Amino acid sequence: MSEPAASVKTRHILAVVTGNALEFYDFVTYSFFAVYIGRTFFPESLTRFSLLASLATFGVGFVMRPIGAYVIGRMGDRIGRKPAMLWSFSLMGVGIAGLALTPSYARIGLAAPVLVVMFRLVQGFALGGEVGPTTAFLIEAAPAERRGLYASLQYTTQDFSVLVAGLVGLGLASTLSEQMLQDWGWRVALLGGVAIVPFGLVLRRALPETFDAPAAAVKLPTSVASHLRTAVLGGMMLAAATTANYTNEYLATYAIHDLHMSASVAFGATVIVGLCGVLCQPVSGILSDRFGRKPVMLVPLTLLLVATLPSFALIEHYRNATALYTATFILASLLGFGSPACVTWLTESLPAHVRSGALSLVYAVSVSMFGGSTQFMAAALIERTGNPLAPAWYMTGFMVIGLAAMIAVRESAPLNASHASVVESLAGS
């Protein structure tokens, strides 16, 4: 039986977003330690390009996300949001523990990279089924006039996990030698997430259910295909947002590998990415509740499009901490202000009986096809062209696609009629 928004307590919202943050911490920490993981499982004796092999393995986790989205997301529409969230969280714990405890290539040979790939597939399956049920829960738990704020917590907690992972990486890089980071430091960062998994399970077991399957089943339309336009436009927006997000998160690896900065400086950029998201995204949600989803998408993400190339050029030219942190702050802040409205628009544009599964699938396909390949493509483009600005050009192309979709969508926020007409006019609808 579903519960009305008024009966969903603040502690329930905290339980959902805390679990979401833990899952994303476990998943994204890999990318921050990609250099060290590459050397551990893909040494130079196995491949000339250990970083590319490591980033390709990071991308492998995205292969399973659409499958996890279909299986776990549909579970959220058939038996409830709560069991779907519990299952995805449990699987993520298995995946991250296995990855952290896998012996190195030097100890077990080819079995090491095989196991790493397997555990990344488990992680991808789990995370693919996380976004749909949790975001659906947040939208359904929210009062109509606060959906933007509640849905923004999906992205806010993702970036909180980035912030925590960055702080962990910064702390380890500042206290351990390069060799210690290589030998075991990155494993400590992963095991920190594993240690918190039992607490996350306890929190989620106490959740109420916001979805009433019998009531939702009688609502029309009954087919996800009937929402193809919504799915396509939402997918385009999410492709742009996820490409920008993973380009920002690549900055630590970019600084270490391509600009030869110290690990402690590089992880500082990761902290800035996470902090900007945590601070900007709730504000974005509040603004989208007040002014609508479209203007809150279009204004900051248009500015992000304009700022991308100059920001990368600043980093490449000066190659110091000030340039890196300034550019990172600009890019992460603009993305933080613009991206929550995209997922809010998509979630509230889908009916309840397909919301969890359809959102999971659209999100997972977009992230898997584009977000999962972003860091590999960034490294490969630099390797192929020798141009350190290649990641900026790649991100710029996707931002153009995303903005085209944002212009095409209709406002979805439950604004009053007069306010809605003003917003539509301002947004160019």
Image: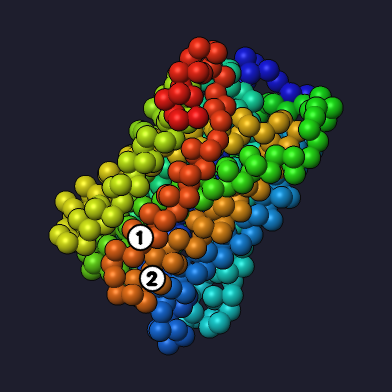
Q: Hey, which quadrant is residue 82 in on the image?
A: top right
Q: Position of residue 249 (x, y in %)?
A: 38, 54
Seen from the viewer's position, the closer of residues 261 and 167 is 261
Q: Is residue 263 left or right of residue 343?
A: left
Instruction: Report crowding for label 2: few under 14, some 14 to 19, many 20 or more residues within 10 A (C-alpha).
Output: some
Per the image, the residue denoted by label 2 is 381
Q: Is residue 372 visible?
A: yes
Decide: few, some or many residues near mark 1? Use Cα within 10 Å; few <14, some 14-19, many ≥20.
some
Mark 2 vs 1: CB contact within 8 A: yes
What amino acid is labelled 1 in the image? Trp
Q: Residue at x 21, y 47 (%)?
A: 326
Residue displayed at 51% across by 73% down:
103
Residue 99 horizontal/vertical position (percent) = 54, 64
Give the mark nearer the N terminus: 2 vs 1: 2
Above or below residue 420? Residue 109 is below
Residue type at numbered disc 2: Leu
- Which residue is depicted at the point 61% across and 46% down? 232
Task: Give coordinates of residue 234: x percent, y percent.
Answer: 57, 42
Circle 1 is placed at which residue position?
Answer: 393
Q: CA distance from mark 2 to mark 1?
A: 10 Å
